[in-house]
Amino acid sequence: MVSTTSASAPSARAFDIKDPSLAAEGRRRMEWAGREMPVLRQIRDRFATDRPLVGLRMTVCAHITTETGNLALAFQAGGADAVLCASNPLSTQDDVAAALVEEGIPVYAIKGEDNETYYRHIRAAIDHRPNIVIDDGADVVTMIHSERKELLPDIIGGTEETTTGVIRHRALEKEGLLAFPIVAVNDADTKHFFDNRYGTGQSTVDGILRATNILLAGKVAVVAGYGWCGKGIAMRLRGMGARVIVTEIEPVPALEAAMDGFAVMSMDRAAALGDFFITATGNINVVDRVHLEQMKDGAILANSGHFNSEINLTALEEMSGEGRRTLRPFVEEFVISSDQRLIVLGEGRLINLAAAEGHPASVMDMSFANQALAAAYLAEHGRTLEPRVYSVPEEIDREIARLKLQAMGIEIDRLTPEQERYLTSWEGGT
């Protein structure tokens, strides 16, 4: 681990990463990811000319991956003075952190850092005294509101990448405590339709396979939650031959899952049937003690939600006592009894980044294009916005979709003048 510290101005080039010598590998991998991110590349080129973020300090709390590296370079091209920290203790790619530091972008993140280090890194990034916050899970925003209120007057606004984070920001807004505007990047169509469904679906299965090397075909997979992430996970599992059960608390997505051909039931019933369980709800103790007690010997538990709260790990530790061991990287066995052993992947943290590389760059291209343009939007308009949670402006969403289609070589139709008149008239009919 290599760390530098400074007591000078907020823009001092301090950092805390594992190993600066990994920078060359990080640059190569960021370049590879960048080839699959044509929309963000166009935005970066535009930023280099327009410089919409000049003079602004940014704290970026995100998974430090190759895709995030390309986003950070776009912010830098736009003139921002950005500092990065990790949004999860297991999601950092240390070579990317090194490459960004070499590019002059301070990073506070080390893969596998303990909770104390994780929050120390967040506090270090907040010490940058940001004007704009890019958050992934709301840890930075909630910490500023609870611990660093003196920073609030300087903050123009923030963005949020995740469903979990948007829930926390809306809770702040509901209680009248949100002190600056938040753009819910997660809710953009070009984010949740694609990133949550196709990105999470593929990368979650990727993480499970890298950790376990198990055959999915013929297994019973229980997916907790049928939001956009759960839909993607269930779709990919079925595509690889698993028999998928969906659990839900909401009637509409439960009905949708049933109409999509999945078995739908309560977790109380599914607990005894599953060979492996994947949580994707953003809630707490979705797999609770009562469910753990019913599970078959060798059942595998993985989480795809942002925080490691969806599986009741405290109850599992109490049930197993000292009977636990690591079987292979990111695979831990908990021995409950002579005839019940349960397996937890990636410490119950989001498995796609704990054991794999996260979403493919192609889908993060759209998500991070939203982040970049939302930051520019806040730079221009944030001071006039009320302190509440906003949707991504529709024109940004549509522009990103248009650029992505263009990069994919796909042409779509345009309305003729006759069709435009018809859609705005009440006079037509049979």
Image (tube, rainbow, N blue to C red):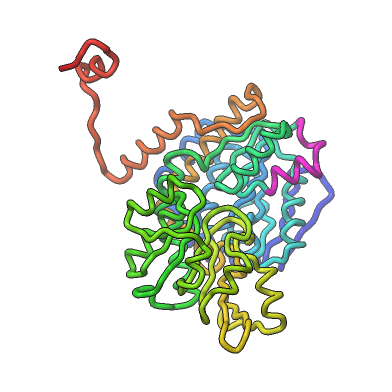
Q: Position of residue 176 (x, y in %)?
A: 72, 31
Quarter of the N terminus within the rendering: bottom right
Q: Position of residue 230 (x, y in %)?
A: 45, 55
Q: Position of residue 29 (x, y in %)?
A: 48, 62
Which residue occupies 57% across, 83% down?
340
Residue at the farthest right position: 7
Is residue 147 located in the magenta-colored stretch of the structure? Answer: yes
User: Which of the two residues, 79 or 58, is positioned nearer the viewer here?
Assistant: 58
Q: Position of residue 72 (x, y in %)?
A: 57, 47
Quarter of the C terminus within the rendering: top left
User: Which of the two residues, 154 or 321, is positioned nearer the viewer here?
Assistant: 321
Q: Is residue 305 above or below residue 317?
A: above
Which residue occupies 58% across, 53% down?
282
> On the rendered structure, is 257 left or right of 124?
left
Residue at the farthest left position: 430
User: Which of the two residues, 203 or 32, is positioned nearer the viewer here?
Assistant: 203
**Prevailing SS of the magenta stretch:** helix
> On the rendered structure, is 406 left or right of 305?
left
Which segment did they paint magenta?
139-153
Which residue occupies 69% across, 42% down?
141
Is residue 110 located in the magenta-colored stretch of the structure? Answer: no
Q: Is residue 120 above or below residue 77?
A: below
Which residue occupies 47% across, 70% down?
208
Q: Can you tell which quarter of the image residue 305 is in?
A: bottom right
Q: Can you tell which quarter of the image residue 199 is in?
A: bottom left
> On the rendered structure, is 338 left or right of 6?
left
Q: Is residue 338 above or below residue 348?
A: below
Q: Is residue 308 visible?
A: yes
User: Which of the two residues, 159 or 98, is positioned nearer the viewer here?
Assistant: 159
Q: Is residue 32 visible?
A: no
